[in-house]
Image (cartoon, rainbow, N blue to C red):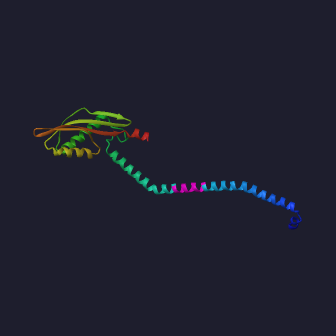
């Protein structure tokens, strides 16, 4: 075959060289963009993989943090649930009279333990919204030692179920103190809450 090429005329050799150069130019003109596209797509795929790997590593690193947050939230929910007045074993909310009676009973108990005398109670007020029941009970009191007030308020704040104080007033009358306190108790209908979750 080499002999066949050598027997070509110089003009044929030039045409053959031009055809080879032209084939190379066409091949390069089509091949280079195709190679660039392939390289670019591969680089994008590699970058996406690196991003995915980094995200997965962050998730793995943060998994313990999220598990701890979940445990903390569960603990807070248990603490909050312990501070609510409960109804029956099925989780239904207690009625307003039952909740008001429980609030009065606990408030009188804490008052007696701290040297505060409950003199009267008013009719309980209630509000119910989306499975939550709030009952406010206003009580009048007397006491001889002003220092007993802080003990009484501390007992209410630390109580389980929790008795929040929404209003408090106290005045001095000669040798004793008298005042009013509004105590609030909360209950939740867990049957409604479970259906909403």
Image coords of residue 30 (percent x, y): 72, 54
Q: Taking the image as drawn, is residue 33 in sight?
A: yes
- The reply, left or right, for residue 4 in relation to residue 189 is right
Image coords of residue 90 (percent x, y): 38, 41
User: At 42% across and 41% down in the image, what residue appears?
Assistant: 194
Which residue sits furthest bottom? 3
Question: Nearest the camera: 120 or 142?
Answer: 142
Above or below residue 191? Residue 21 is below
User: At 72% across and 54% down in the image, what residue appears?
Assistant: 29
Image coords of residue 134 (percent x, y): 32, 37
Q: In the picture, which quadrant includes the C terminus?
A: top left
> How many numbered marks have been drawn onto this rendered protein structure?
0
- The reply, left or right, for residue 20 in relation to residue 116 is right
Above or below residue 127? Residue 158 is below
Question: Nearest the camera: 134 or 63?
Answer: 63
Instruction: Tell me which segment is drawn in magenta.
Output: 44-54
Magenta-colored stretch includes residue 90: no
Question: Nearest the camera: 36 or 43?
Answer: 36
Q: Chief secondary structure of the magenta span?
A: helix
Q: Where is residue 2, by image quadrant?
A: bottom right
Magenta-colored stretch includes residue 45: yes
- The reply, left or right, for residue 58 in relation to residue 1 is left
User: At 78% across and 59% down in the image, what residue appears?
Assistant: 21
Q: Where is residue 118, by image quadrant?
A: top left
Q: Taking the image as drawn, is residue 98 in sight?
A: no
Q: In the picture, which quadrant includes the N terminus?
A: bottom right
């Amino acid at each position: 075959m080499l002999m066949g090429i050598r027997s070509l005329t110089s003009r044929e050799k030039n045409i053959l060289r031009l055809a080879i150069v032209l084939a190379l130019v066409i091949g390069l003109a089509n091949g280079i963009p195709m190679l660039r596209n392939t390289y670019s797509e591969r680089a994008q795929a590699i970058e996406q993989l690196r991003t995915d790997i980094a995200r997965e590593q962050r998730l793995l690193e943060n998994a313990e943090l999220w598990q701890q947050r979940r445990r903390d939230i569960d603990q807070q929910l248990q603490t909050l649930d312990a501070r609510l007045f409960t109804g029956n074993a099925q989780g239904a909310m207690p009625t307003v009279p039952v909740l008001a009676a429980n609030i009065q009973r606990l408030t009188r108990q804490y008052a007696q333990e701290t040297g505060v005398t409950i003199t009267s109670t008013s009719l309980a007020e209630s509000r119910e919204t989306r499975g939550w029941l709030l009952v406010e009970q206003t009580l009048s009191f007397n006491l001889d030692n002003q220092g007993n007030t802080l003990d009484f308020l501390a007992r209410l704040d630390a109580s389980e179920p929790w008795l929040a104080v929404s209003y408090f007033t106290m005045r001095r009358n000669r040798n004793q103190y008298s005042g009013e306190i509004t105590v609030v108790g909360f209950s939740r209908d867990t049957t409604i809450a479970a259906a909403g979750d």
